[in-house]
Image (tube, rainbow, N blue to C red):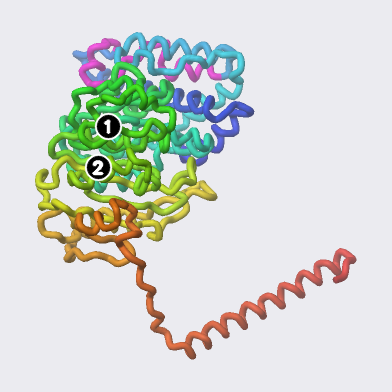
């Protein structure tokens, strides 16, 4: 079986959707990808068990013991493939989904089961089944082919859906930055608006890259209000074998908190920006607001901040995305909360990000990092200090297969991460990507450690540009005469090439009996 590139798979799959809306087709594609994953995982273990003369490959308990979903005969991919070109393929897939849910308790209510609907082109559906059959899984546990395809499709659908895509997907480079700064390695990880689970997937990768395994190291908790997105998250995590507590159901974190008593060591989130109808008027006396103030009913930004602070463990750290307006919001309630957060030393670091990272919004965005206690968790005493990082002009690069969206470069992620880790570690040294150490120092125009007194002077404004200054203009070491000589020669070459092109165009027009 030849390996099919995820880019080619997307192009072919996207052609099959005809006039179907991306938001609807998303569940068709991702549901089938998940079904393929379940079946392939089962087949691999089936082959292993079949080699054991004392084991029965049709015994459900054998698969439960290996943490693999049990797939009855009629739900296996070979059976689905055999019916791919028949009008009944939609019903065949629905039946497979029902059977798998019935046999696997953790998947109850998660899998999509509307492939038989009349509006879904059954010929195109069968072609999609054939396409997915060409995904080469292989035996390399580090390859994660289906997981990679699933994540790639999530990103493509998010961009296709525009603003609504932001409800379930955070750009990968932004997730990588948050995870690398927080460094979740042992304890409880929480995302109160987890979307499709990108923060959890990247946390798992962080642990595996550094320590080899995630088992027993991270306990994952999440919540998501949108039912379909909640299901996407369940599938996204299951495809990688990540156990997570996502609550009993999809639910609003403000009004139906599924983890009321949770105190997390790491919180990472990308809450929806500037939500005005979050029902704050019904939560005036909520204990989550504590001594900081009541969030305004017309904007949920500060409600998210206080919700996450409430759920932090005594030595926990939270990193999350917000709109830049949160840094200097001037309503009385927001100003009061921001002032109290600063005076109570809960804000550790603020980062403003470059533009173009989110396809779903043009609103400038920033990262907040807050902590319960700057004296604990193995770091130096940072009492009365906040690190400000202005990354708006740091390097980005075009996102693959997107004409407009950009991503943070590896160097930019490393520079920001190193500055933050240097700020909070004992030695105050920057750990470079190659493992070398250099003494920490403020970098004009980019980052600066600021004392509480200066923040008070600026009336509790948290905009990094107000503190880091302007980046110095690089001096041109090339002498003027030499530079002008070099540029003049380059211009002469370009002009000669232009003349040649003009002559070629004129000759071609003459051949067509046209003259300038």
Give the residue furthest to the front: 332
The answer to whether residue 432 of the structure is visible from this angle is: yes
Horizontal and vertical percent position of residue 142: 29, 39
Q: Earlier in the sequence, mark 1 or mark 2?
A: 2
Can you identify the residue that label 2 sits on? 206
Q: Is residue 69 magenta?
A: yes
**Residue sitting at x 34%, y 22%:** 282
* Disc 2, SS: helix
Magenta highlight range: 58-84
Q: Where the N terminus falls, by quadrant?
A: top left
**Residue sitting at x 41%, y 80%:** 476
Mark 1 vs mark 2, CA separation in Å: 25 Å
Residue 127, picture quadrant: top right
Give the residue furthest to the bottom: 481
Mark 2 closeness class: few <14, some 14–19, many ≥20 residues within 10 Å: many
Horizontal and vertical percent position of residue 227: 41, 21
On screen, residue 502 versus residue 480, left or right, reads right
Residue 470 vs 74, above or below: the answer is below
Horizontal and vertical percent position of residue 394: 38, 59
Residue 73 vs 396, above or below: the answer is above
**Mark seen at residue 277:** none
Q: Nearer the viewer, residue 233 or 137?
A: 233
Q: Where the C terminus falls, by quadrant?
A: bottom right
Can you identify the residue that label 1 sits on? 307
Mark 1 closeness class: few <14, some 14–19, many ≥20 residues within 10 Å: some
Horizontal and vertical percent position of residue 81: 49, 20
For the residues bearing labels 1 and 2, Cβ distance under 8 angstroms: no
On screen, residue 507 versus residue 432, left or right, reads right
Residue 322, picture quadrant: top left
């Amino acid at each position: 079986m030849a390996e099919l590139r995820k880019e080619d798979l997307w192009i072919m799959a996207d052609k099959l959707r005809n006039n179907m809306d991306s938001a609807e087709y998303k569940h068709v594609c991702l549901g089938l990808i998940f079904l393929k994953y379940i079946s392939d995982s089962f087949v691999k273990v089936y082959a292993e068990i079949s080699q054991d003369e004392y084991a029965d490959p049709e015994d459900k308990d054998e698969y439960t013991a290996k943490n693999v979903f049990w797939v009855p005969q009629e739900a296996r991919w070979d059976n689905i493939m055999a019916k791919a070109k028949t009008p009944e393929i939609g019903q065949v897939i629905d039946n497979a989904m029902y059977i798998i849910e019935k046999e696997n308790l953790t998947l109850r209510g998660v899998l999509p089961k509307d492939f038989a609907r009349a509006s879904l082109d059954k010929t195109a559906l069968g072609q999609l089944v054939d396409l997915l059959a060409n995904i080469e899984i292989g035996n390399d546990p580090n390859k994660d082919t289906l997981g990679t395809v699933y994540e790639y499709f999530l990103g493509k659908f998010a961009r296709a859906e525009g603003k609504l895509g932001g409800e379930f997907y955070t750009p990968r480079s932004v997730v990588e930055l948050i995870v690398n700064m927080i460094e979740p390695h042992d304890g409880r990880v929480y995302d109160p608006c987890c979307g499709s689970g990108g923060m959890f997937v990247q946390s798992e990768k962080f642990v595996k890259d550094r320590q080899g395994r995630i088992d027993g190291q991270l306990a994952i908790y999440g919540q998501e209000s949108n039912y379909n997105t909640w299901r996407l998250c369940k599938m996204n995590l299951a495809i990688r074998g990540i156990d997570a507590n996502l609550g009993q159901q999809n639910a609003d974190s403000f009004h139906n908190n599924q983890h009321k008593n949770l105190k997390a060591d790491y919180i990472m989130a990308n809450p929806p920006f500037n939500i005005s109808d979050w029902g704050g008027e019904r939560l005036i006396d909520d204990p989550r607001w504590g001594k900081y103030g009541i969030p305004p009913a017309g904007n949920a930004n500060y409600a998210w901040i206080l919700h996450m602070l409430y759920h932090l463990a005594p030595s926990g750290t939270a990193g999350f995305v917000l709109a830049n307006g949160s840094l200097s919001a001037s309503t009385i309630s927001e100003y009061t909360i921001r002032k109290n957060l600063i005076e109570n030393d809960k804000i550790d670091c603020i980062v403003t990000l470059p533009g173009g990272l989110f396809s779903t919004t043009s609103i400038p965005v920033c990262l907040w990092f807050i902590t319960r206690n700057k004296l604990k968790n193995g770091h130096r005493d940072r009492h009365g200090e906040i690190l400000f990082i202005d990354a708006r002009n740091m390097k980005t690069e075009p996102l693959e297969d997107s004409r407009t969206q950009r991503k943070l470069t590896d160097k930019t992620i490393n520079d920001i991460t190193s500055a933050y880790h240097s700020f909070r570690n004992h030695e105050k040294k920057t750990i470079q990507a190659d493992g070398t150490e250099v003494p920490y120092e403020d970098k004009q125009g980019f980052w600066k450690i600021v004392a509480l007194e200066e923040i008070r002077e600026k009336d509790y404004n948290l905009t990094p540009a107000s503190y880091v200054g302007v980046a110095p203009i690089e001096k041109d070491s090339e002498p003027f005469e030499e530079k002008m000589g070099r540029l003049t020669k380059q211009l002469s070459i370009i002009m000669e090439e232009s003349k040649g092109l003009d002559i070629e165009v004129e000759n071609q027009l003459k051949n067509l009996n046209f003259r300038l």
